[in-house]
Amino acid sequence: MQYKISVEELCMKLKPVFGKKMDDLYLKYAMADSLQEKEEIEHFLNVLYKKHLSELLDKKVLLEPPAKENMDGDYNLAMISYAGKKLFPFNLREKDWMRHVCISGMSGSGKTTLAFHIANNFIQKKKPFLIFDWKKSFRPLLLADPEILLFTVGNENISNYFKININEPPPGISPKEWINVLCDLITESFFASYGVHKILLETLDEAYRDFGVYNGSKNYPTWNEIKWRLDDKLEKKKGREASWLMSAMRIAHIMTFGNFGKCLNYKGKDIMNVDDLLKKKVIFELNTLGTVEKKFFCEFVLTYIYKFKKARQTGINDNFDHAIIVDEAHNIFLKEKTHFTNESVTDMIYREMREYGTSLICLDQHISKISDTVSGNSACLIAFQQQLPQDIDAVSGLMQLRENRNYFSMLPVGSAIVKLSERYAMPFLVEVENVELRSREVSDYDVKGKMKFIFESKQIEEGKDEEFRKEIISPKSFEEMSKEKKKQEEARVPRHPLFNGDAERFRNAQYSRIGKDDSFKNLDRLQEVPRMIYVDTKQAEPEAKKKVSRVFGAQREELSEVQKILYGFVEKKLNMGWHINMIERMLEENAIEGNYSIADVFNVINYALKNRLNNKEANNLKAGEEIKAIPKQQEPKPAVLKPANNPQTAVNSYTLPAFTFVTQPVNMSKLVSEPKPADTLKTKPATGTQIPEFVTTPKIQNNKVYKEIVPVENEDNNNSEEKFLDFLKKNPNHTYTTTEIYNMLGFSARKGNKIRNELLSAGKIKIEEIKNPKGWKKLIRLK
């Protein structure tokens, strides 16, 4: 039996087509005196309905549109449609964004096109925004606005400039509060248990305490440090706690692995300031990351922004000042509850973020998978075509269209049903126009070039590029440039067979390794790769023969502000009795993630050595240790090794064209030893030069001189490594744990871990995992 449509319904459906004429006709019908007049009007309305709308009802969605004045606003997103006719623009207002927007629809239905319209409105209104781009869909927006920043998170080949230390809390948030939030977020992102939460919380707390964070230090540990601590704990635990630790180690491994780990554990000088990003238009491309990495990164950034704004703001912000577009939102705002909390961190953020002037715009293919907090707390719901029954049930209930749920499967591409919580309470149909910009291509090369230019310009603007800034503000004169060029040419070290191999590599890397303690009582052990110094005869001081300390100061320049801080640290540790090698190693290891470079460490260590040696020059200067002046015009002589009269103690002076290499005393009896016939060469002594009958080949010279002059590590550390390796050689099939090996060798846990890590890095040992009834066991083996 066919349902008969009433006159009132006919007028309502025809009103968008004929306007106020339908109101007049319905009034005439209601005021008619005779039944015949009413039947005539009803018949007339049925004819109009069949002519214009009957066919549409069978094939298309027909929803009554709102009044035009109710759709006024500043942000034009689409056109309101009725019966196949576009009526007027659909606009959102400033306050609508504050209450969030939820956009759903199957793949290819028009969600991203609408998101482009939204972003274009923000660009025109100069509203800062942030987009989490899971599929590299929003890259063409770079062509719409040159100010947009695009970060390819975890992809070093393009634009991986977003690097932070996630353990450092936002300004205004205490470390204790931050580690609680961070642990909640991590366990939620990685679906971890309460036991893992407990392990991570305790480990982070210990690391913060050891790094002095609770005492005001800004040196926050990274997750590399957390991972090492968890690894040490794992060797001492058994049972349930061991399984918690293994799960925590899995999380720590993901947080430190590859380029994604570099993004989250960065301590360099160009670390990103999230406050600055909130004032800009930013796109995070996440397509190179794994699903878990994408999920955690999005949740972390959302949490950081939420906490940052909450700490900075004292009241409710009624002004819309920032927007965040979240693609694939069901991965971030999960429908499933967390293991040990009633509400997830991200759900709390979605509910409360509006109080701080930020709009959240969620895009997803399956609205049935999104958290109820998102779908139920969005003031603007936009639904494109749906096919999954669960999605149709969910969205029809939200739109109050359960009786017409088939509408959502009938929607063509680009059409959507919209429901607002204010202005107009009934759902209506809109059509989203295609965006030509989406089809344009932006290559990786274009992104890389643009972002590189932006960040280099930013460094110059902020004064971080001191060399460029100095050249612009006070350009050097031609004479100054000539002198500098001459100085650089004079500092060039020519090649020599003696310095092939490792010694050459260390000298080129500008490493300065000193192999004795800070008392410096035995200067004969303070050997380095020989450095040159050139002295013009016109500038030579005849009355004072330059002492050995000038060799160490030959390449020193004035310390920068960063180097002054490092120098204060070095002096403090030296006065406490620390080994100079230990200090240098500590600085070099932290330089990888710190606010200084290896070159800074090199200058500071040499500067500290010079100051220490200056106090001992008079007592330690011996015969033949002066720096000799060599005229520039002097004919070059072949490089020779000149032993002094005393074979046990001599000064090495390697004379080359316009250069003199001078080193500290070296034990000649060790340097020139009885070689094997296969490794020696017969030579003829030069006139007036005393040399041994046999001179070792460059390979043997390298081994002897390098070990004698450039000790890479201190003697105690070398002995410890040899002791460690010797134990493994004698026990190739041992089943001892790492802790048991340390105890048998007499190493502390810290010292043992340090030596183990050094041998692992050198490729001398390996970690082998074997399975036993209690689980997996790690064993150290020779490689």
Image (spheres, rainbow, N blue to C red):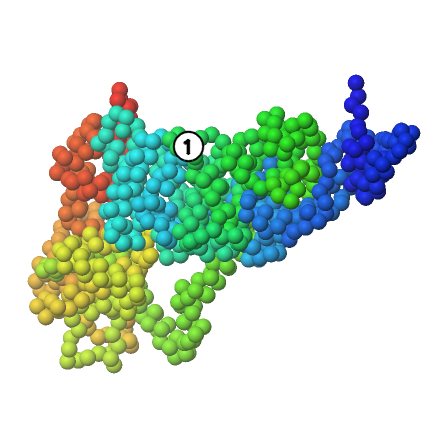
User: Residue 690 at what x, y percent from top left?
Assistant: 14, 64
Residue at the image position 8 percent from the left and 68 percent from the top: 619
Q: Nearer the viewer, residue 100 or 460?
A: 100
| Residue 154 appearing in the image | no
User: Residue 590 at what x, y percent from top left?
Assistant: 29, 52
User: Residue 721 at what x, y percent from top left?
Assistant: 19, 42
Quadrant including the C terminus? top left
Is residue 572 left or right of 431 when viewed as pictured? Answer: left
Residue at the image position 52 percent from the left and 33 percent from the top: 372
Residue at the image position 41 percent from the left and 71 percent from the top: 470
User: Residue 35 at what x, y percent from top left?
Assistant: 89, 29
Question: Which amino acid type is shown beneath numbered disc 1?
Answer: Asn
Residue at the image position 27 percent from the left and 50 percent from the top: 213
Q: Nearer the viewer, residue 710 or 769?
A: 769
Q: Looking at the image, how many numbered discs can be counted on the residues?
A: 1
For label 1, the SS is loop
Quarter of the image for residue 576 reads bottom left
For disc 1, the marked residue is: 342
Residue 417 versus residue 687 in the image, above or below: above
Q: Nearer the viewer, residue 645 or 739?
A: 739
Circle 1 packing at 10 Å, graded few (<14), some (14-19), many (20+), is few
| Residue 573 appearing in the image | yes
